[in-house]
Image (spheres, rainbow, N blue to C red):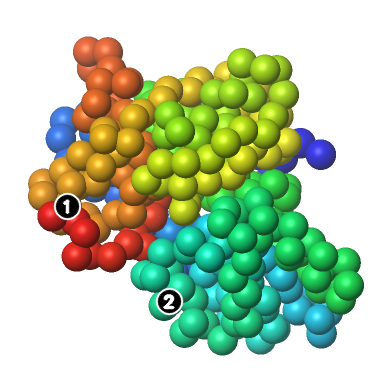
């Protein structure tokens, strides 16, 4: 199933009032930040989680068994938050390596938390087993059409908030965010995926002609640590001619520190990854090009920012 612009538009109507319309700020001539780190639970993820749950509620798929989700942290926070707001139980599977900042917030959201394995893929397999045993609703971190459509509402907001732009830089893990944004704005601007060199899911999929498994590592692995690009994301990036650029860990670390020093934005490493494409020169805008950077996540220990 290919996610369409109409799917994104319907998602925007469905989740209206449930998520924040996050602000944009012009930080330099031709450079704008979309501040998704100010979304509920500190990342863009509630958009997709709410759209998945509300769609399932409409169709009768959301039952008394509640939901299960697997996450490196941010999706788990979003799924637990959406479930709590809708009054349904949630069981969230996260790796044992999940940062303490994310675990601490997760424990405030009334979810049953299960830590298993060292990376997202292991937590996901555990979540699948429980979903099959209980019949709970699976809320995927990135590879469900409702999730992709929900994330695409970021793009619809950009079209309303920014008076003309040429390029949007988006961090990529499993690809739900970039798939949704590309679907929403492909007729208006180009979309560039920015990936850690140690977790290049989209870059590898485009090179191989299909999503394939790979190793995961690096400073942003807790939020961009999918082993492979989602099938829906691959269909979207192919259809909308999305390109990938890679950034090294030291560039991500430096970009995160610069976001704090220059703009007082406290981001996690994944949240700074898109900006790292500019600060490192991995992506060089042409003269007069108007660029939007999606700053997508804030769930970090602020003591590590300096």
Image check: 172 left or right of 137?
Answer: left
What crowding class fits label 1: few (fewer than 14 Cα within 10 Å), some (14-19), or many (20 or more)? some
The residue at 41%/25% (across/down) is 246
Q: Position of residue 17 (x, y in %)?
A: 52, 71
Check the image and name the residue furthest to the top: 287
Image check: 192 left or right of 46?
Answer: left
- Give whichever of 277, 3 is nearer the camera: 277
Disc 1 to disc 2, C-alpha distance = 21 Å
Q: Position of residue 132 (x, y in %)?
A: 88, 67
Name the quadrant containing residue 304. Answer: bottom left
Name the quadrant containing residue 213. Answer: top right
Q: Mark 2 = which residue?
A: 105
The residue at 62%/66% (across/down) is 116
Q: Position of residue 285 (x, y in %)?
A: 28, 18
Image check: 223 left or right of 277?
Answer: right
Q: Mark 1 = which residue?
A: 260
- Give whichever of 32, 207 is nearer the camera: 207
Label whose residue precedes the other's in the sequence (1 or 2): 2
- Helix, strand or loop under label 2: helix
What crowding class fits label 2: few (fewer than 14 Cα within 10 Å), some (14-19), or many (20 or more)? some
Image check: 276 left or right of 234?
Answer: left
Which quadrant is the C terminus positioned in?
bottom left
Residue 294 vertical placement versus 304 (above, below): above
Label disc, if present, on residue 20 of the rendered structure? none
Q: Position of residue 9 (x, y in %)?
A: 63, 49
Which quadrant is the N terminus positioned in?
top right
């Amino acid at each position: 199933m290919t996610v369409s612009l109409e799917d994104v538009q319907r998602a925007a109507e469905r989740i209206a009032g449930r998520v924040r319309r996050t602000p944009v700020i012009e930080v330099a001539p031709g450079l704008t930040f979309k501040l998704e780190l100010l979304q509920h639970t500190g990342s863009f993820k509630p958009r997709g989680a709410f759209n998945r749950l509300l769609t399932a509620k409409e169709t009768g798929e959301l039952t008394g068994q509640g939901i299960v989700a697997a996450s490196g942290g941010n999706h788990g926070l979003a799924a637990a938050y959406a479930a709590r707001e809708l009054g349904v139980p949630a069981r969230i599977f996260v790796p044992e390596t999940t940062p303490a900042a994310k675990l601490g917030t997760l424990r405030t959201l009334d979810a049953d938390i299960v830590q298993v394995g060292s990376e997202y893929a292991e937590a996901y397999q555990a979540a699948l087993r429980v979903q099959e045993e209980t019949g709970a609703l699976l809320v995927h971190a990135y590879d469900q059409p409702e999730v992709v459509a929900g994330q695409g509402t970021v793009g619809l907001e950009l079209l309303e908030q920014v008076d003309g732009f040429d390029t949007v830089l988006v961090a990529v893990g499993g690809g739900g965010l970039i798939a949704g944004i590309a679907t929403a704005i492909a007729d208006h601007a180009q979309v560039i995926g920015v990936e850690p060199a140690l977790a290049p899911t989209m870059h590898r999929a485009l090179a191989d002609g299909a999503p394939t498994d790979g190793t995961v590592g690096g400073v942003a692995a807790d939020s961009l640590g999918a082993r492979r690009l989602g099938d829906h994301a691959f269909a979207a990036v192919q259809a909308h001619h999305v390109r990938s650029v890679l950034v090294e860990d030291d560039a991500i670390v430096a970009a995160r520190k610069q976001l704090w020093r220059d703009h007082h934005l406290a981001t996690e490493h994944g949240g700074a990854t898109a900006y790292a494409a500019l600060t490192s020169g991995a992506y060089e805008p042409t003269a007069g090009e108007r660029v939007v950077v999606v700053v997508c996540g804030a769930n970090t220990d602020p003591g590590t920012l300096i």
